[in-house]
Amino acid sequence: MTPPDDFNPPVGVAENLGGDIRRVLAPNPSPMTYRGTNTYLLGTRALAVIDPGPDDTDHLNAILSALEPGQTISHIFVTHAHIDHSPLAARLSDKTGAAVLAYGDSSAGRSAVMQHLATSGLVGGGEGVDLGFAPDVCLADGEVSHGDGWSLTAHWTPGHFGNHVCFQSGDALFVGDLVMGWASSLVSPPDGDLTDFMESCHKIRALDAQVYHSGHGAPIADPAARMDWLIAHRRTRETSILEHLSHGPATAETLTELIYTDTPATLMRAAVRNVLAHLVDLHVRGLAQSTQPLSEGASFTLTPPHV
């Protein structure tokens, strides 16, 4: 999916998105983060901050400068513990006295197979993990947090990351990195789990939301269509992987070279991790099997049909 050229907001400036929601763009553009991380401010007096972003002093000052006379920050919510979303939470909390709320620390919510991969030595690839992240308050799936004129419902949505949460405010859903309008989301084991990712996609597809506010990129004004595209995109990738495996064993890297023929070189490592996520998912579902212990370099083959 080609990124839209018309999304290029000013860095560090609070922009009104309607519904008492403002966005402040962090100064961390990259092939993985697009224009940078979106930090959101919700409310009119005592505000909620969603995804404070990377540990960047300029961005910290931009968030604090966005406060209007009479406004304070009462809560800091984090969708997940990647280094472009969570590290600034601790410094912002120190400055404001606001508690940090999230599903859990950087290892929370990890599935059994991903925990096994992590224990066996597989490390994540992509945005990087905020290993020191520890919220003041751990939120349960479906838990509602109330503030001054606002409320947020936490929907645990593992897949991109084990501790990933989407936050719902009325008909707006803050979707973190589960859904992005400019690209499909990275799923990189052992932090990302495609089996969980697909379940989370179906979960939020069923929610009553009219707009998604993503961790990166512009607001998504047609959430249903975006989710249908994202789910179909992943199913198409799965079909392609199964087709190539029907010709014999292959590794994630080999399959990536065969499938991602038009992907820029800067994104090929992320593509390999996405393919690995598909292979692990197929292994869990019994459709493929690894000829070696599960790892990025393992060779996979189709599971023989039962007689």
Image: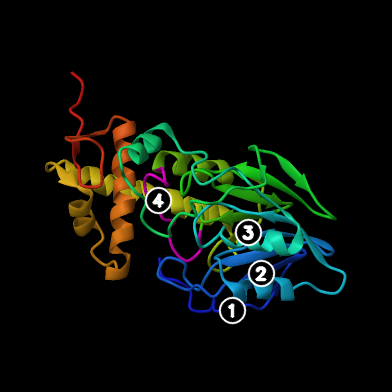
How far is disc 3 from disc 2 in space, using C-alphas?
A: 16 Å
Residue type at mark 3: give it: Ala
How far is disc 4 from disc 1 in space, using C-alphas?
A: 27 Å
Q: Which percent across, then down, holds residue 207? A: 63, 45
Residue type at mark 4: give it: Val
Residue 183 vertical placement versus 146 (above, below) = below
Q: Residue furthest top?
A: 307
Q: Which percent across, then down, holds residue 209? A: 66, 51
Q: Residue furthest left?
A: 248
Residue bearing the label numbered 4? 187
Residue type at mark 2: give it: Arg
Which label is found at residue 23?
2
Q: Is residue 78 visible?
A: yes
How far is disc 3 from disc 1 in space, using C-alphas?
A: 23 Å
Whether label 3 touches label 2, CB < 8 Å: no
**Residue nearest the viewer, comparing 70 with 261:** 70
Question: Which residue does the image show at 55% across and 51% down from the upper left?
Answer: 133
Residue bearing the label numbered 1? 9
